[in-house]
Image (cartoon, grey):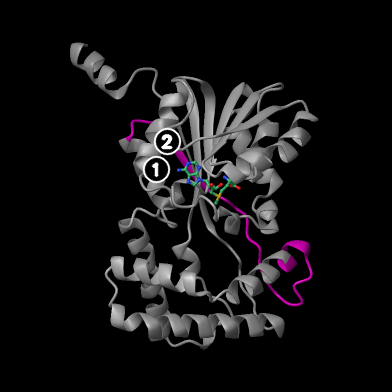
């Protein structure tokens, strides 16, 4: 799996501000999470999603996390201990979402957050999640459509021509498509998840989007604004050759013209530097929303082929 060894780039403090607590309460009620006695968080990382969702499960629920990066498995006791203090039995083990180290029909509830976007074959991962889910069990996948952010207006982008905006989107889309072609995931697959659920045979599919936004407006004083702004500054300074080379590979695999790449990259880097300056000058205003899709479905009591068989005989 490609992320092993450098998935730490995904974990910033901003992850602690991804959800509105009352929205999570609402989702927990809609999905009746309080009836779930065993749960698995696939690609749990440092447990940001586990910690949000586990308190809504049945009292004394058994919670397992699995991750393909050994570093997160090693670091897990630090955060799982705090959950045990709250009466939750949480443990993390090493494993691949494409070949989960659990027996069939082990869990009432299986979930993941921002993991399918990283795997080479998301439907394969879903079938694995289905396999370890008990019949009648609940699957909840939470995945973003990151390309949406490329088209959101901000005060900074208002100075670009429509052609420049369109070129920026085309650059991002080409990179995204190339990532998928190379089996490195698809950072914008959130909107495709309901269709995947249907294809793998889940029933009662329900889809929501998160209501969380982190609007930016000067002087960026709120704690979550400060975290976002600091993260943007750090990320925008990271014009490292390894990232450039990787992005070139995605761009070309996505059908981009290799001879155009250096100029497009340079423009992107320049815009990022200007953006950082504008943030520093306190002149950037934006809505700060991310399209995060929450998709749930129920594992049928029979396999789809057995159901079809039953229907044929009826
Ligand atoms: C963006 S992080 C999300 C972590 C956590 N779910 C959260 O929301 O904070 C993606 C996580 O998925 C893990 N991961 C990526 N591919 C995986 C795979 N094939 N099997 C298991 N874990 C995987 C990475 O190691 C990383 O911890």
Residue 25 vs residue 262, the one in the foreground:
262
For marks 1 and 2, the one nearer the N-term is: 1
Residue 37: give x, y in percent of width and height. 62, 21
Q: Secondary structure at mark 2?
A: strand
Q: Which residue is mark 1?
A: 194
Q: Which residue is mark 2?
A: 205
Question: Ligand 1 near label 1 (Cβ, under 8 Å)?
Answer: no
Magenta segment includes 224? yes
- Residue 52 in view, yes or no: no
Q: Which residues are magenta?
A: 200-226
Most extreme residue toward the top is: 313
In magenta segment, residue 52: no
Name the one closer to the observer, 283 or 251. Answer: 251
Q: Classify 223 as above or below 88.
A: below
Indicate the quadrant where residue 6 lies. Answer: bottom right
Q: Is residue 77 above or below residue 103?
A: below
> In the depicted view, which residue is nearer to us: 190 or 132?
132
> Looking at the picture, does residue 309 appear above or below residue 210?
above
All told, the count of numbered labels is 2
- In the displayed structure image, the side of residue 280 where residue 41 appears, left or right: left
Asked whether residue 88 appears in the rendered view, the answer is yes
Rate crowding at label 1 as few (under 14), some (14 to 19) or many (20 or more) other CA atoms within 10 Å.
some
Query: CB of mark 1 within 8 Å of CB of mark 2?
Result: yes
Name the residue at 70% across, 70% down. 230
Q: Residue at x 67, y 29 (%)?
A: 90
């Amino acid at each position: 799996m490609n992320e092993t060894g450098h998935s730490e780039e995904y974990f910033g403090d901003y992850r602690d501000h991804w959800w509105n607590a009352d929205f999570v309460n609402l989702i927990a009620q809609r999905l009746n999470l309080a009836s779930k006695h065993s749960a698995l968080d696939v690609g749990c990382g440092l447990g940001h999603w586990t910690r949000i969702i586990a308190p809504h499960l049945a009292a004394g629920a058994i919670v397992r996390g699995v991750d393909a990066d050994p570093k997160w498995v090693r670091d897990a006791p630090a955060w799982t201990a705090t959950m045990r203090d709250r009466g939750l039995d949480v443990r993390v083990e090493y494993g691949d979402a494409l070949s989960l180290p659990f027996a069939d029909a082990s869990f009432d509830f299986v979930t993941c957050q921002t993991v399918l976007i990283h795997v080479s074959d998301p439907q394969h991962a879903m079938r694995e999640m289905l396999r370890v889910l008990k019949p009648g069990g609940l699957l909840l996948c939470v995945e973003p459509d990151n390309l949406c952010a490329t088209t959101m207006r901000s005060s900074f982008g208002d100075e670009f021509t429509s052609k420049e905006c369109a070129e920026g989107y085309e650059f991002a889309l080409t990179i995204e498509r190339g990532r998928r072609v190379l089996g490195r995931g698809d950072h914008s697959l959130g909107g495709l998840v309901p269709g995947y659920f249907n294809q793998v045979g889940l029933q009662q599919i329900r889809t929501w989007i998160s209501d969380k936004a982190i609007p930016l407006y000067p002087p960026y004083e709120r704690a979550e604004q400060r975290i976002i702004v600091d993260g943007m500054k750090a990320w925008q300074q990271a014009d490292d050759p390894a990232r450039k080379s990787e992005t070139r590979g995605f761009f070309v695999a996505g059908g981009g013209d290799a001879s155009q790449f250096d100029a497009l990259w340079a423009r992107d880097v320049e815009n990022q530097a200007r953006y950082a300056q504008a943030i520093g000058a306190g002149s950037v205003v934006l809505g700060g929303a991310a399209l995060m899709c929450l998709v749930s479905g129920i594992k049928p009591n029979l396999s789809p082929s057995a159901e079809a068989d039953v229907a044929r005989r009826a």
